[in-house]
Image (cartoon, coloured by chain):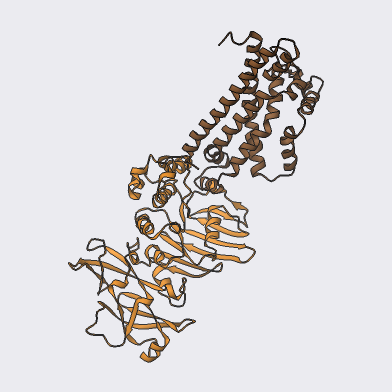
Chain colours: A orange, B brown
Amino acid sequence: MLDVALRHAFADFTLQAAFRAPPGVTVLFGRSGSGKTTIVNALAGLLRPDEGRIAVGDRTLLDTRRGIRLPPHRRRIGYIFQEGRLFPHLTVRQNLAYGAWFAPKDAPREETGRIVDLLGIGPLLDRRPATLSGGEKQRVAIGRALLSAPRLILADEPLAALDEARKAEILPYFERLRDEVSVPILYVSHSASEVARLATTVVALEAGRVTAHGPASEVLGDPAILPAGAREAGAVLTARVVRHHEDGLTELDANGLALFLPQVARPPGSAVRVRIAAHEVILAGERPHDLSALNILPGTVREMHPGDGPGVIVALDTAAGRVLARITRRSATAMGLRPGTQVHAIVKSVAVAPGDVGGPGRAGTGGASAP
Amino acid sequence: MADWLGPEEWRAVALSLQVSLWATLVSLPFGILAAYALARWRFPGRQLLNGLVHLPLILPPVVTGYLLLLTFGTQGPVGGVLAEWGIVLAFRWTGAALAAGVMAFPLMVRAIWLSLEAVDPKLEQASATLGASPPWVFLTVTLPLILPGIVAGAILAFAKAMGEFGATITFVSNIPGQTRTIPSAIHAFLQVPGGEGSAVRLVIVSVVVAMAALLLSEVIGRRVAARVGGV
């Protein structure tokens, strides 16, 4: 359990944030300039906040009132930086061993071989960072942080410096970390799809304040929050792979509702999280017939949240879970939508991007337990 | 080759190498410390330290030599204390090494300072988050990364020490076998009739040693840079 309360005044804004993070991946989510990196640097001890308290488990790292301020090297926090920051004068093997060498001998630690396998960096061990690609560097950086026997892993937009293909390469490793490594992870991101795939808990930040905080499915499914703005809105459903069809579609079961998505590279029976972008959802009053879209989810309107423009975000409760739809206010009026109205949410299979389907997370429901 | 140089010339060459080597090795830790302090720390008296380090570069060497004599001579405040412990610098080869080291110090510090400024502090932060205390950060990250600068600074200082004349002759005079380094020997040979031959031979030795030092720094620098990853 991570417990954070910070206040720090900058010239142009004040960070005032408090949150708790249960085990699993907690994503600090917000636009650039919302104070995410400040929080992470304060956690690592690289920034000295005006006031605050930080505790990991029963260990207090910072308490300005009691005059406690552990220096960075005594915090045992595995920091994965945006730019990797591998030591250029050491080989990959030496980089990986660096943190482990400083860790207390009795600290619970991961086995090097297992982490090397998990990250697929075995063939790189004798190379120097200058010869690695961006994605390889970042995988080594993840390994280096993990092997320092950390109490907590911090990842500050670890994918931001990578192109789309490299992002797709690294993201699954973070899913594996979440599912296979017991260290809690605080992950900073401004990407809705990264949040949807990784987060057990979401802490949404705006202008230095926490605007929402809770299990991922709740925060992402709440039309009043939309931490990334209406354009990026999307809900997360949890489903189980049923079978792969010959025409390239994968059939999923989301609590009794069938979903058809383009090939999901996971075996039948495995659980997945699917992010459904709000702007890809069409609403219909009657159940439509003779329709090209394959996914029809009946549900009840729960909330409607008008935006600044002509749009409105409609939150539906379906058997599969909370679904968000972004439609025009004109359509909402024409259909007579209001909380309680029965509607059908329609999602084209091909509208779900492969990057929006990911592993289930430890808790399985995508939401996990409340903090 | 051995009889190409006369015994007195050989002594000058050997003494020069001895003096320069000691001057470089002994001043190196201080050079690294001074460069680190100047590049990284903000403290009262930083400008004073900066001035002190650079003084030998701008003062006439004779003045530096005279100041050394005043300070480290057997009657001087530091020299007197050292003399009580049995360490005498004035008119000894150790004094020549001190003079050479002081004269070469600014060059050494500047080279190391420059390489320190090229070190990305983000790497040192990364090292700290991985559990390295400040001395360990310095030993395992900063020091290896500034190694090219240290090598360049040391070789530059060595070359400068080989050529030091003004401060040396003022502080420790020109005693054959004790303080007569190559430049002093050249100077002495040129004062006596028929000494031009010896002087020319020592000039050739000077040129060869200087070129070798330059070449060596190039080779070592390139090797170290490759190890650090070509940056």
Residue in the picture at 45% in, 46% down:
A148
**Residue B223 vs residue A49, the one in the foreground:** B223
Position of residue A30 measured from the top left corner of the image (x, y, whole percent): 49, 67
Residue in the picture at 66% in, 34% down:
B107
Quarter holding residue B102:
top right
In this picture, is B120 found above or below A318? above
Left or right position of A36 against B91: left
In this picture, is A129 found above or below A38? above
In this picture, is A152 found above or below B35? below
Quarter holding residue A230:
bottom left
**Residue A187 vs residue B124, the one in the foreground:** B124
Q: Is residue A371 visible?
A: no
Left or right position of A273 against B6: left
**Residue A215 vs residue A224, the one in the foreground:** A224
**Residue B219 vs residue A342, the one in the foreground:** B219
Position of residue A172 measured from the top left corner of the image (x, y, whole percent): 34, 57
Position of residue A80 measured from the top left corner of the image (x, y, whole percent): 46, 52
Task: Count every numbered label the image shows and give the total.
Answer: 0
Quarter holding residue B176:
top right
Position of residue A83 measured from the top left corner of the image (x, y, whole percent): 48, 53
Q: Is residue A6 visible?
A: yes
